[in-house]
Image: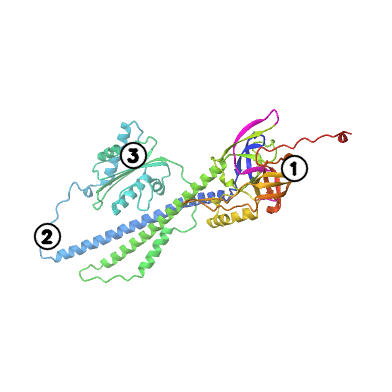
Amino acid sequence: MGRAKIVENRGGGLYRATPIYNLTALNDELAKIQTAEAEYSALLYKILNSIDLLRKGYREATTAVDNVIEQWKQKLIDRAASVIAPPSPADPDDPATWPAVESAKEGELLAAINSARTAASVGTVTRNSDLDLAMLRLLREQASTKKMGHFDSGGTPPETRAAIAGYFAESVGETLDYGAVTAADVVQNWQIDPVAKATLLGATYLDVGISFVYSRTHPTGYLWGAIYAVPGTPPPNVTVTYPDPAKTAAKEEETKLDKIELPKTDPLTPEKLSEVIGEFGKAAAKLNAAEKDLEELMAERLARLARNSELLTFKNAVESLVLDVWACYMNEELAVGDTVYTAEVPGHWLFSSSAPLRSATIYAGTSRQRTIFFTEQSWNIIRRDTSFSSSLTPATTMIPGTVFYNLALEPGHLKWKPAWRYGVIESITGAVCSVNLNPATARHVPTERGIEGLDIDLNDHDILTNVEFDYPPCNVAAFVVGDEVLIRFNQQDRTKPVVIGFRRAPKACPPKRVTWEQIQ
């Protein structure tokens, strides 16, 4: 037995109502997801800062190896008998030779951006140091990894990078350019690309972060970037009580590597080569372990967001579901907002907008007689029955094992411990009747491969005999042969069926006859 909330009284015992599901578990899970999301933001900040430090260590280790190798090469050259020509003067076009090259180029880029925005009648943007840091971190990493794009190696999007740098934005946009030599060329390239142009000239953006990086090893050499933002409200301060997984993973890798004995150097190898190679190996392994943990954390978040969307979609669907439902007894007194008890007859899982459209005559034989149309569902409003105390619980809030268990047992339970059935009265003898049960089969379950299930007959017998009536105050007097009725099995005992009302268009009890004996 479930419950429903009345939405509309359509007359004649027909209502429109919303089924009430027990959403306690669903709401609890949503609350846990929201808490996890808040913790994720705080933890992500810790992890990315750790990874930033590990990347710095990796870059330093790489530089150390490069320097020692250069020393080795120089020693080999010094041993050579040939004369080496002196190096050529520094190339004036090489950005590495420019004084304060990065800050100079970044200033030019900011001026070019605001010039383009002014020309498009859009307000200028103000440079922000936190956004600068977010942009610089991305370009430095890409200079090292030789990659391009709006996501770093950990899959971090621009808005998250901005938050990690200390800037909390309502909205974020980003434009990148690889290979252009001047700031003017960069902005011109952005205005050619429709997506980049829309971001460059976004009217809502107030702040911007600028960065320029030159890399001899990057395929493009020149890396430019601008991140635009609308200031937002910082998230609540959440304390994360568990350790930083990135630091933990890095420490575990370092412990493993400390047990590995490094190879001995040969005479031509500088003394420090073995040492710096060992440090490089540790730095690379620690960074790799930390980034793997970050990937796992972000994968968990994606799964969590998908689950959040699934739960919210279901909740909105069930809370907005409005269906036609007949009272099994004549009751026109229910008001909008009333909570009623319902009987879910096998087939109620077919709740859908595609339910069959039916018609029924209400107030038959009176001046109010009319035909009413409705979508038929396998459920009815009933009088409160304390022998049933269950509620409708969505399967999406259960663990898979519980769902499987209930689906597996459902056909047997509905057959041997029935609660409700529909049937047609075949005969009436005194105060009892015979009822021909409507067909009832087990639920067919949607799966990834389609709708699956067995056509299990849920009726033990097609004909029920000696069925009593529980339809106060008149009981059998309200019914005739051919009526389609709702049957309750007392105590879910298939040997104790009782007719408790009509499937549709319930009838009122006929007025009592008044005899002379009663008048006297």
| Residue numbers of the magenta segment | 365-389
* Tag 2 secondary structure: loop
Q: Nearer the viewer, residue 247 or 377?
A: 377
Q: Secondary structure at mark 1?
A: helix
Residue displayed at 28% across by 39% down: 187
Question: Mark 2 vs mark 1: which is more N-terminal?
Answer: 2
Numbered label attached to residue 84 = 2
Residue 12 visible to the viewer: yes
Q: Position of residue 122 (x, y in %)?
A: 35, 32
Expressed as whole percent of the image width and height from the top left, the position of residue 405 reads 57, 57
How much space separates mark 1 and mark 3, taking CA atoms? 75 Å
| Front residue of 319 and 110 | 319
When the figure is inspected, residue 145 is found, relative to residue 204, above or below; the finding is: below
The label number, if any, that marks residue 195 in the structure image: 3
- Classify residue 171 by image quadrant: top left
Separation of residues labelled 2 and 3 (CA atoms): 52 Å
- Which image quadrant is residue 510 in? top right
Which disc, if any, is residue 476?
1
Kindly identify the amino acid type of the residue bearing the numbered disc 2: Ile
The quadrant the C terminus occupies is top right
